[in-house]
Image (cartoon, rainbow, N blue to C red):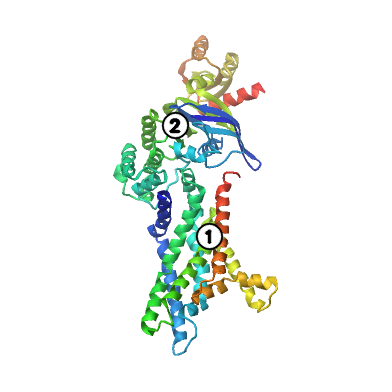
């Protein structure tokens, strides 16, 4: 456990020792702020039946942040170590492959959650001015945070996998983005599916990230959503581990 | 300590290691010698469990590097080629991080880190970022990391490459200091380096084991070259050189009338007396007569020729 903590701390220090992490934080703050303005101007004077959180995820900003920023967080994880050669000292230390994979994933996920802190400030502002718990209850904020964590863990695992495949950070970022975007846009087929009940339409609805996210932001914890995110995260972490391990049988 | 048998590594079609076998006893300092691309780094990466061999076996202190990598990793301190380090960390922070990975107990961790920093002479740069350190200092940070867990076996891949002469001397001194307490495997493509630091050498060439054993014994088998400068007309010198029959002779006329002859390929014997006698017989002034110790290149040439001769 001590070793794992040291590894995660090292992962986080990579973000904060240089300008990289702060640039990402600034970009995300800008996008969250922009989204916040859009939400506020939308709410201005109009009554809405949805909680504010749900309105926010209805805007594009949430998904832009997720799709664009996630690969920027994870692109360094393995690719940088490979490019600089420190991968060799890391993998010959008395630690297991799983420890390395999970620590890189955990470090990325913690940094990703830090990125969303400004959203908490935005929520508090809304809450203070509206003063009505129906608009933004503690419960919906909590389930929304859980949703952000779930989507984030999936995208961090995808990004780690992409980064493990290459020694080039740009390639890691682009392939991570492509994988993440492909998954996101596949979910769009659920719009065409309508309310048909054939297996393809049901599948489209099931892999629609927007659908899963919507229930979280409505204040609902859907077990099938949790299983969906956790199993896909597990799958990509498993694949990442296989890639890391492959140096020993290639 | 190390037992390597029939180790083979293929990258697709390319054979990086071809049936290499050797062993290293506890407490020995062994030099791993060979030109670039000979398979030195590949062997070291396999021994340090970084990657697996295509076939063959390798054991460190009895533990197989493929089946018990965790146990092997606990016994080794490894500095890879080009000494990769995270440039964004301070030297002391990096070593503390490494100490944690190597499971040094919390209580001894700080103590051990400052101990190795003192030993490697980096205590004065402990709080500087590694990215700001000179190559010589970085090399010593890498070596400090290798020493950290007091490993039984220290593996250093090209520890002096890219250093200036003073830094090379400092690293060599450090290696000699460590030699007493650890088994060491050091790779290099520079012979003099291995000569100064190692008890025994393992020579690789194109993925094959050329020779292993005491360096002086191996060098005795290599051909030394003898250079002579005589004052005589060029055609006569050429005839004289052929008559001497001391192997291959390179002959070049100097601007001041002297002719320079370099005889190489004289096995196991010092031919200077014969050359001197032959020159004085003809009454030629002789102004230089010297024997050059065989270079690594010469050793390779004689070893590879020997191999081909046996086939």
* Residue at 57%, 15% in the rendered image: B240
Describe the element under mark 1 as helix, strand or loop.
helix
Point out which mark residue A157 bears: 1
In depth, the one of B163 and B237 nearer the eye is B163
Describe the element under mark 2 as helix, strand or loop.
strand
Viewed as shown, does residue A155 lie left or right of B109? right
Chain of the residue that carries numbered disc 1 in the rendered image: A
Chain of the residue that carries numbered disc 2 in the rendered image: B
* Residue at 59%, 63% in the rendered image: A179
State the image quarter where residue A162 is shown.
bottom right
- Bin the neighbour count of mark 1 within 10 Å (Cα to Cα): few under 14, some 14-19, many 20 and up: many
Q: Where is A127 relative to A14, above or below?
A: below
Q: Where is A65 relative to B156, above or below?
A: below
Q: Find the residue positioned furthest to the right.
A: A198
Image position, residue B47 (x, y; %): 52, 36
| Residue underneath mark 2 | B184
State the image quarter where residue A114 is shown.
bottom left
């Amino acid at each position: 456990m001590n070793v794992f903590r040291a590894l995660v701390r090292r992962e986080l220090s990579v973000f904060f020792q240089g300008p990289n992490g702060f640039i990402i934080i600034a970009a995300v703050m800008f996008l969250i702020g922009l989204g916040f303005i859009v939400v506020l101007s939308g709410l201005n004077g109009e009554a809405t039946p949805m909680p504010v959180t749900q309105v926010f995820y209805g805007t594009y900003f949430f998904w832009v942040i997720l799709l664009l920023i996630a690969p920027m967080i994870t692109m360094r994880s393995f690719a940088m170590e490979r490019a600089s050669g420190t991968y060799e000292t890391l993998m010959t230390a008395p630690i297991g492959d799983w420890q390395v994979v999970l620590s890189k994933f955990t470090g990325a996920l913690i940094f990703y959650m830090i990125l969303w802190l400004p959203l908490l400030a935005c929520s508090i502002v809304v809450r203070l001015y509206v003063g009505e718990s129906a608009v933004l209850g503690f419960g919906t904020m909590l389930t929304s945070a859980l949703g952000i964590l779930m989507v984030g863990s999936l995208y961090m695992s995808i990004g780690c996998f992409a980064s493990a495949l290459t020694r080039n950070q740009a390639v890691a970022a682009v392939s991570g983005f492509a994988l993440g975007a492909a998954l996101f846009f596949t979910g769009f087929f659920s719009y065409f599916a309508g309310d048909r009940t054939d297996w393809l339409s049901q599948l489209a609805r099931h892999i629609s990230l927007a659908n899963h996210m919507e229930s979280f932001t409505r204040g609902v914890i859907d077990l099938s959503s949790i299983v969906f995110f956790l199993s896909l995260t597990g799958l990509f972490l498993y694949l990442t581990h296989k890639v890391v391990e492959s140096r020993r049988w290639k | 300590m190390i037992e390597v048998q029939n180790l083979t590594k293929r990258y697709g079609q390319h054979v990086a290691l071809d049936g290499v076998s050797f062993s290293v006893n506890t407490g020995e300092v062994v030099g791993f010698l060979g030109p670039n691309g000979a398979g030195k780094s590949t062997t070291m990466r396999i021994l340090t469990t970084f990657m697996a061999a295509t076939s063959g076996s390798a054991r460190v202190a009895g533990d197989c590097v493929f089946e018990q990598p965790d146990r092997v990793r606990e016994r080794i301190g490894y500095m890879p080629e080009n000494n990769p380090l995270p440039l964004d960390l301070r030297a002391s922070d990096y070593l503390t991080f490494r100490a944690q990975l190597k499971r040094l107990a919390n209580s001894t961790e700080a103590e051990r880190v400052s101990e190795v920093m003192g030993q490697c002479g980096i205590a004065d740069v402990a709080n500087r970022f590694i990215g700001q350190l000179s190559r010589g200092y970085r090399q010593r940070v890498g070596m400090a990391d290798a020493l950290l867990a007091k490993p039984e076996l220290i593996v250093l891949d090209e520890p002096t490459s890219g250093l200036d002469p003073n830094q090379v001397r400092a690293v060599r001194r450090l290696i000699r200091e460590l030699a007493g307490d650890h088994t060491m495997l050091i790779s290099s493509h520079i012979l003099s380096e291995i000569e100064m630091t190692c008890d025994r050498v393992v020579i690789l060439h194109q993925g094959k084991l050329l020779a292993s054993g005491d360096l002086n014994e191996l060098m005795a088998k290599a051909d030394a070259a003898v250079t002579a400068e005589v004052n005589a007309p060029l055609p006569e010198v050429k005839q004289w050189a052929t008559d001497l029959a001391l192997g291959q002779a390179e002959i070049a006329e100097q601007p001041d009338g002297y002719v320079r002859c370099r005889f190489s390929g004289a096995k196991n014997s010092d031919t200077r007396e014969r050359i001197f006698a032959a020159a004085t017989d003809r009454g030629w002034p002789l102004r230089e007569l010297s024997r050059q110790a065989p270079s690594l290149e010469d050793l390779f040439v004689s070893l590879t020729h020997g191999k081909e001769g046996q086939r």
